Image (cartoon, helix red, strand yellow):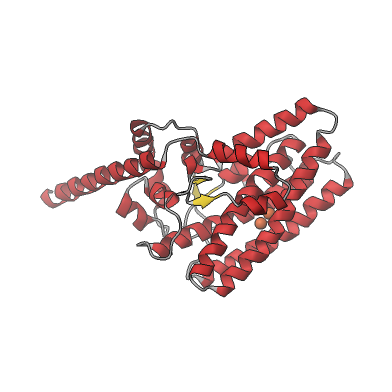
C-alpha cells in the first residue's frame, strides 16, 4: 500500500462532489485589500460555479454569486438569519467531510510512519476508532436536520493542509491544527443547539468534543516526544502549525475577534494542552488577512456584478 497519499487520491463514492481547494488556501494568504479579494473571486468564478452545479449549494451561487461562501463564513451561525437552515446544513456537511478527513489523517499517521513507537500507533488507532464514530454521528445529525451526504461539494483542504510527510509535523498539523479547529467549531455548534433547544444535537456534539480534546492532547504529547532534545526541530514544528492554523482561520472568520463566525474555544483548548501563550498567538494569527469589513464589502460588490451578469444573459436569451 502506498504511503503519503495525495489529497486527490482520497477515495469517495459517487454521492460525493469534489471541490478545488484553491479558494480556501488563497483567502487566508490575501492582504486586507478590497480589489484583491474581489478580483480573486471573479477569477475563480467559473471554477466555483462548476463545483457547485447539481449540489444544494447551487441556489446559494445563484443568489449570492461566486463569493457566497464569504457571506456564510463571515456571519456567525444564527437561527434567526435568512437561509439559516441551508447555512447550518452547509456547515454540518463541512464537519461531516472534515471528520472523514480526520479519520483518513489519523489512519495515514498510523501507516505512514512504520518506525514510530508502538504507543504512537496505538494512539492513532484509538483516534481512527473515534473518528469513525464521529463520521457516523455527523451523518445522523445531517439527516436529523433534513440534509444528506453529498448535498454540498467537498473540499479536501483540511487533509491537504495538515498532512505533512514528517511525523512531528504531521501530529502538529493534524492533531493540534485540525483537531484544534474542530474544538472551536464544535463549541460553537453546542451554543447553536442550546439556542435552538436541540437536545439531540447538543448532546451528540458534546460527546464528540470530549474525544477531540483527547486527539489534541495526543498531538501535544507526541510533538514533544518526537522533538525531544532538538529545540530547532520543535520550532520548525511550531512554525508548521502556525501555517496550518492560518489557513484554518479562513481570513479571520475563526478568530478571537468579538464578531468572529467561529470563536476560539479557549477553555477547551487549554484542557487539551495548548498553552495560554500559544492561544494568544493563535488569536493574533487568526486576526490577519482581510478584515470582516473588506470581506463583507467584497461579497456585496461580487453579488451585484453577478446579478448584472445574470440580467444581461437573460436579456440576450430573450432577444435571440
Ligand atoms: Fe472527530
Ligand atoms: Fe478528532
Where 53 falls versus 112 (above or below)?
A: below
The location of residue 313, given as percent across then percent down, is: 20, 47
Say which quarter of the image contains residue 30.
top left
In-front residue for pair 47/225:
225
- Report the side of 201 relative to 70 (left or right): right
In-front residue for pair 96/215:
215
The location of residue 199, given as percent across then percent down, is: 57, 74
Task: Tell me how many marks there are.
Answer: 0
Where 287 falls versus 107 (above or below)?
A: above
User: Ligand 2 is in which quadrant of the figure?
Assistant: bottom right
Where 284 falls versus 13 (above or below)?
A: above
Say which quarter of the image contains residue 111.
top right
- Report the side of 11 relative to 82 (left or right): right
Q: Residue furthest top?
A: 232
In-front residue for pair 6/253:
253
What residue sits 83% from the left and 46% below the top?
120
The location of residue 173, given as percent across then percent down, is: 67, 40
- Report the side of 227 relative to 13 (left or right): right
- Report the side of 320 relative to 243 (left or right): left
Q: Looking at the image, can residue 31 be seen?
A: yes
Q: Looking at the image, can residue 6 be seen?
A: no
The location of residue 310, given as percent across then percent down, is: 23, 48
What residue sits 18% from the left and 51% below the top?
314
What residue sits 48% from the left and 40% below the top?
251
What residue sits 71% from the left and 29% below the top?
236
Q: Residue furthest right?
A: 118
Q: Which quarter of the rendered picture does the N terminus lie within?
A: top right
Amino acid at each position: 500500500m502506498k504511503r503519503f497519499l495525495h489529497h486527490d487520491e482520497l477515495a469517495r463514492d459517487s454521492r460525493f462532489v469534489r471541490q478545488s481547494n484553491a479558494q480556501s488556501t488563497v483567502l487566508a494568504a490575501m492582504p486586507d485589500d478590497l480589489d484583491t479579494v474581489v478580483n480573486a473571486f471573479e477569477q475563480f468564478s467559473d471554477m466555483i460555479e462548476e463545483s457547485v452545479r447539481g449540489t444544494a449549494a447551487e441556489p446559494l451561487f445563484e443568489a449570492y454569486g461566486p463569493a457566497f461562501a464569504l457571506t456564510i463564513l463571515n456571519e456567525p451561525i444564527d437561527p434567526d438569519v435568512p437561509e439559516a437552515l441551508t447555512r447550518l446544513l452547509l456547515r454540518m456537511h463541512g464537519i461531516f467531510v472534515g471528520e472523514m478527513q480526520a479519520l483518513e489523517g489519523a489512519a495515514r499517521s498510523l501507516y505512514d510512519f512504520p518506525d514510530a513507537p508502538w504507543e504512537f500507533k496505538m494512539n492513532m488507532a484509538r483516534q481512527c476508532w473515534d473518528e469513525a464514530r464521529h463520521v457516523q454521528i455527523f451523518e445522523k445529525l445531517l439527516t436529523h436536520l433534513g440534509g444528506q451526504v453529498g448535498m454540498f461539494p467537498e473540499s479536501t483542504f483540511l487533509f491537504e493542509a495538515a498532512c505533512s510527510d514528517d511525523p512531528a509535523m504531521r501530529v502538529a498539523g493534524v492533531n493540534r491544527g485540525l483537531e484544534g479547529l474542530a474544538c472551536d467549531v464544535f463549541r460553537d455548534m453546542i451554543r447553536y443547539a442550546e439556542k435552538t433547544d436541540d437536545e439531540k444535537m447538543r448532546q451528540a456534539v458534546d460527546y464528540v468534543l470530549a474525544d477531540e480534546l483527547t486527539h489534541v492532547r495526543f498531538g501535544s504529547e507526541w510533538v514533544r516526544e518526537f522533538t525531544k532534545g532538538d529545540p530547532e526541530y520543535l520550532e520548525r514544528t511550531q512554525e508548521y502549525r502556525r501555517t496550518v492554523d492560518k489557513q484554518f482561520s479562513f481570513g479571520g472568520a475563526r478568530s478571537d475577534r468579538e464578531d468572529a463566525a467561529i470563536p476560539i474555544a479557549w477553555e477547551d483548548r487549554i484542557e487539551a494542552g495548548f498553552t495560554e501563550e500559544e492561544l494568544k498567538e493563535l488569536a493574533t494569527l487568526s486576526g490577519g488577512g482581510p478584515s470582516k469589513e473588506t470581506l463583507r464589502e467584497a461579497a456585496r460588490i461580487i453579488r451585484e456584478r453577478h446579478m448584472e451578469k445574470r440580467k444581461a444573459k437573460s436579456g440576450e436569451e430573450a432577444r435571440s
